[in-house]
Amino acid sequence: MKKTILHAAAASALALSAMGAHAEGKLNIYNWGNYTNPEMIKKFEAEYGVEVTLDGYDSNETMLAKVKEGSTGYDIVVPGDYMVAIMIGEGLLAEIDASGMENFKNMDPNWVDVYWDPGRKYSVPYQWGTTSFTVDSAVYGGDIDTLELIFNPPAELKGRINMLNDMNDVINAGLRYLGHPRCNSNPEQMKELLALLTKAKADWRTMDYSVIEKLTSKDVDLSQSWNGAAMRARADRPTLKYAYPKEGFTGWMDNVAVLADAPNMENAKLFVNFMMDPENAALTSNFARYANGILGSEKYMDAEMLDAPEIVMPEGAPVPDFVPPCDQDVVDLYNKVWTRLKQ
Amino acid sequence: MRDALQTQSKLRSAQATRAARKRRARLLLLLPALLVIGLFGLAPLSIALVYSFLEPGTYGGVEWVFSPDAYVQFLYERDIFDDTLVFNSAYLQIFGRSFGLAVITMIGTLIVGFPVAYFIAARPPEQRNFWLFAITLPFWTNLLIRTYSMLLIVRDEGFINLMLIKAGLISKPLEMLYTDGAVLAGLVYSYLPFMILPIYASLEKFDFSLLEAGHDLYATRFNVFRHIVIPLTRPGIVAGCALVLIPALGAYITPELLGGGKKLMIGNLIALQFGAGRNWPFGSAAALILMALVLIALLVSLRAGASKEGGND
């Protein structure tokens, strides 16, 4: 009872603030930090006479926690693939029916029927990329397209490896190396995984998110990495090569979505349509260094992005593996494995 | 007589109102501090306390169902096969490591800090301010930046290694970064002023002629130090130890940056529960357990300081 009163109060407060906000032509975007091209924002503001404010977050979970509290005042969020699925399930996203929008024709058909939003009722592509690893070819000259380099490294890479300090990325890489399925709650296989990770950890130097800094300072010669970060590190250390391991690697997509309680719903829809314009999608890619899933955006993209080995996958590379959100019992088990690994 | 009584009672009531007014004034003066403590100290703690007895929500948050699981989980885990509770030392080990590191940091700052404080206290009064200024100078820069600078100095291609290689003393860089030693050095450096300042405050009041008296009575240098200097500066030492130990326990940035993130510390363990771990009740419980342990440690150390002081009287 108390909760419903609270909810009602929150809803009416929101409704009031919504009316106030819309009249002024505003749009509040909540996106990952250092991920939004200021030029793209300026262009949107000029085109529609809308004043945009921008806030940043550092992980899907941070964003979810804040949005779940309600009445954030944000209109647009940019959740990762699995987080879109979670947020739809929690009723946090507005059904904007992107497929009916004018610029929907530009979306690469491969990105329409995705597991996290079949038919694109709630979200459109922002950026997409892969999570694999990048290695200095001057230090290790052999075949790099294998996870052996991480889990059973050759002598020259021992103690020269950085892994992402990310439970899911490390566990998923290990599961691929062992050939076990993702979102794994099989106790035997998870025991095997823990043994593998514990043994391999002795050969890792660090577990840290700051991939670019670790590589360019030459603290490590191999780092688990997102493809865009690998490209930015290569600009400083040209012998770096991004690997497409035969055992598989993670694919991910961040998506533009509108919050169910968005105060500026119409402006938010305008923005979603705006982001499917090839020129605007290219503005984002030129800034963040990832591909965008909008056809025709290549024309506006920086030349060095079009043939970057981090972005253009070679023939015969495995299809990127998009990992759906795991059930709570799997997350609990992962949590235990991760704690054991770092205890 | 009656008049006298009346004036007396008037006086008394005036005194009473004055006392009441004083009380009210004191309360009003305390109000801002109480509000800050209540709003930003007690309220979040109560939330953590309530959350720690709830069930974790799917995808973060909490379910409003009572459950002591978060505390049980700290020491026990359900066996994967037959669902019985078995003892699990993983979290205790993480707490143990953090405590160990904090205690060694405390000892390190004491060993480095005491002579420094003694040196400053032994200067002529007009010079002391300069030395105190020098001690507090690093605080003008953000902790993150100071820690990061340290990383730049000790890394493989950092200042120290480059100098040693240039000097021809080593051919390959020493691997100093991302070790327990690097974390310890970072913590000692960061918390050193917290040790120096309270000890200096004790030493400042110290009567150095007592040392001469000790020597006159044929005490060795060690005995003078042990029986005169230490007892008289004990309050400063205890305060410094507490001031270093407590923040070192919750240190987050230093172990993360200089340790390479391969091992969990208490701070990182708690942060994990609110992020990818999606277990807010356990995160709250871990934070409260840490606080309880710190409180106990603090009470014990204060009691130790007080009883010794009492013994000297």
Image (cartoon, coloured by chain):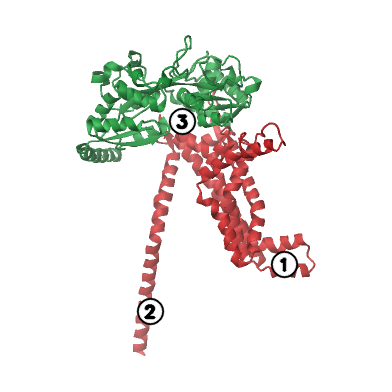
Q: How crowded is mark 1: few (under 14 residues within 10 Å), some or many (20 or more)?
A: some
Residue B312 x %, y %: 67, 65
What hue represents chain A?
A: green
Question: Judging from the image, what secondary structure is the residue with disc 1 in?
Answer: helix
Q: Name the residue under label 1.
A: B211
Q: The red chain is which one?
A: B
Q: Mark 2 points at which residue?
A: B12
| Number of marks in picture | 3
Q: Is residue B162 left or right of residue A86?
A: right
Gap in Å between the C-alphas at discs 2 and 3?
66 Å
Q: In this view, does A336 lie to the left or right of A95?
A: right
Question: Judging from the image, what secondary structure is the residue with disc 3 in?
Answer: loop
In the image, is residue A160 above or below residue B21? above
Q: Residue at x 47, y 26 (%)?
A: A232
Quadrant in which the N terminus of chain B appears: bottom left
Please tell me which of labels 1 and 2 falls first in the chain: 2
